[in-house]
Every structure is written in C-alpha cells, then in structure tokens.
Amino acid sequence: MVNFKEIGLVNTREMFKKAIDGGYAIPAFNFNNMEQLQAIVQAAAETKSPVILQVSKGARNYANQTLLRYMAEGAVEYAKELGWEKPQIVLHLDHGDSFELCKSCVDMGFSSVMIDGSALPYDENVALTKKVVEYAHQYDVTVEGELGVLAGVEDEVQAEESHYTKPEEVVDFTSKTGVDSLAISIGTSHGAYKFKPEQCTRDPKTGKLVPPPLAFDVLKEIEKQLPGFPIVLHGSSSVPQDEVDTINKFGGALPDAVGIPEEQLRMASKSAVCKINIDSDSRLAMTAAIRKTLAEKPAEFDPRKYLGPARDNMKKLYVHKIVDVLGSDGKA
Ligand SMILES: [Zn+2]
C-alpha cells in the first residue's frame, strides 16, 4: 500500500476550489502509453497548468495497472526535470465501476477516483458511492460521483441514450454520499461520434455536422442547488475537424465524426465546471500524425519516427486546450 502523497501527487480538493473561484477548468486527459504521458506532462509543465492524469479500466487492462501507476510517479519526476518545481498532478481513476476497483486504486497511490454508479437505480448509486467515499477519505483521496447518463462509447462504458442529470437530485446525492465532485450529464457524450446526424444540422458551406448546444439551463439549475460545488464534464472532446480531415485524407474512415464546440466548453469552464475530460481529441491527434507520416514516408519503420510526430501533435493539442479553452495556464 502506498499513499499518493509519498509519490508527489495531489488530490483534487484545493485544485477544484481554486478553479471555481478563478473561473477556469482543470484538464483531465486520459493516458495509456508513454508518448501520451510525455505530451501531457510537457504541455502542463510548459504552461504551468494543474493537470489530471486519467486512467480508465480499459487503460489498466491495456497497459497494466502497475506499470501505469509507476508511469504516473515518473510523470511527477519528469515534470520537475522540466523545471516545474511543485507539479500539481492528480492520478485519477476514470469510471470506476466497483468498490473493489476503487479500493485497489486508492491502495496503489491514486490521489482521486471516480465511482460511476450512474447506470444503477438511484439508491444503489448512493450506497455504492458512499462506500467508496468512506474508504477513500481515510487516505485523503478525493472521489467523483456521477448522476445522469451520457450517451456514447468510452472503453467499457456505453449507453444508447443520454439522460440529463436531474437538478432536484443533486443536493440529496452529494450530502448522502459525501463526494468531492459530481459528474453531470448536460448533453456531452463519449467518443468521436457524439451525435447522430439526425440530431445535428449541417453547415451548408462545409457539409460538416453542427451539433446541438449543451443544456446550460440544466447546469445553471445545478449550480443554484449546489453553490460552489465542483462539477465535472465527461465526453468533452471537440473532435477537431482538421485532424479528422487528415485521418480521412490518409486512408482513414471517420465519416461525420463530431464533438462539442470549444466555444461551449469555454463557457462551461467559467462556471462551476472545474474538470473537463478530454480523451478522443488526443486519440485523433495521434492517429492523424501517424497516418500522415506513414503515408508520406512509406519506407519508414522506426516507430520513433511516427510516434514522435504523434507525440508532438498531441502536445500541441493539449497546450491549445489548456491555454485557449480551459484557461488553466499559469495556475500551478
Ligand atoms: Zn467519461
């Protein structure tokens, strides 16, 4: 058993309070390989942005849980090497689906866990979340719960339809469970196909899909019910169309991939939303760079020659999110 403080990580408590007071949001980037982690740490260190490294159950299965945990420890040391004296780095379990998984992460040095009981009946969600909070708080590990269902696919998490969070439930849920932050559903969605074409309009000039707006009225009502309480948005990739175009140009097939417009995430960042999850955009940036390199240099077979450009492209994306969308630069 190792506590997160021993390996230089921080939990989300202070970070979220400052973000709400300061009107910005903390980036939560998923990682499951070295190049992604390098890109995240470089971007955060250069911009002096607090950052949440997220590990999903799928990532643990893919990369090995022990290896990921030591990579996160390495990330703290790497950040220091890059000149970031006191790195503000959280290691967070994304979409924990059982008490046992959350406990295992707490015991391995995670500083934050999510218990996602949103697919369960309300009372069972409360009971499970409460159990995780009681365990995690003994070690000062912060806990994110979820109310409402997001549509889309993310690793093992998937749902056909979204159900907005019911504002009338949030006070009861947070007070009964003791969670430190709450993920809500207001129209964001997992994956690179966040909306079906029939949910969107089409830009007559480009032929690209224009997604429906987020339910800011629901967010406002939740903020009214829970003043100053940290709110989390999952499924908040914007699916940059230049990356999608690059992928499609070099042999990919991502028709009608569509995400959340950055302007809406900018608005959300200024509210009680203090953590914004971004995963698909990094996958797209990586895939676009790899496809382009391999197509333009067919004789190349040194993985560093295509993973290197992929890393650079992801870093550019992370810096852009931090500086131009979430506003968390200079806050750590
Ligand atoms: Zn999610």
Image (tube, grey):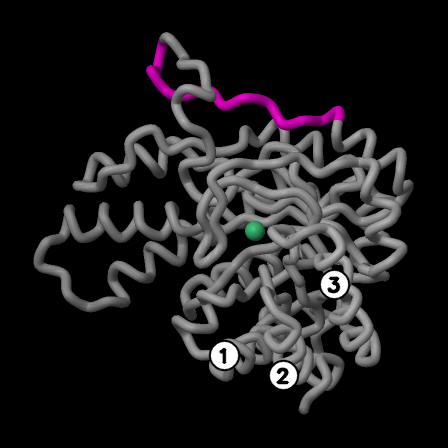
Q: Are marks 2 and 1 in contact (CB under 8 Å)?
A: yes
Q: Which residue is mark 1?
A: 65
Instruction: Determine the CA span between mark 2 and mark 1.
Output: 9 Å
Q: Is residue 8 magenta?
A: no
Q: Is residue 14 left or right of residue 120?
A: right
Quarter residue 245 falls in? top left
Residue at 47% in and 21% down: 199
Q: Which residue is mark 2?
A: 108
Q: Which residue is mark 3?
A: 129
Specify which label sits upstream in the sequence, 2 or 3. 2
Q: Is residue 312 left or right of residue 277?
A: left
* Viewer-proximal residue among 211 and 162: 162
Residue type at mark 1 is: Gln
Q: Is residue 215 magenta?
A: yes
* Viewer-proximal residue among 300 and 160: 160
Furthest-top residue in view?
204
Mark 1 C-beta closer than 8 Å to ligand 1 = no
Q: Nearer the viewer, mark 2 or mark 3?
A: 3
The residue range painted magenta reads 205-217
Q: Is residue 80 left or right of residue 296?
A: right
Residue at 54% in and 66% down: 55
Mark 3 neighbour density, 10 Å: few (under 14) some (14–19) many (20 or more): many
Furthest-left residue in view?
299
Instruction: Determine the CA span between mark 1 and mark 3.
Output: 22 Å
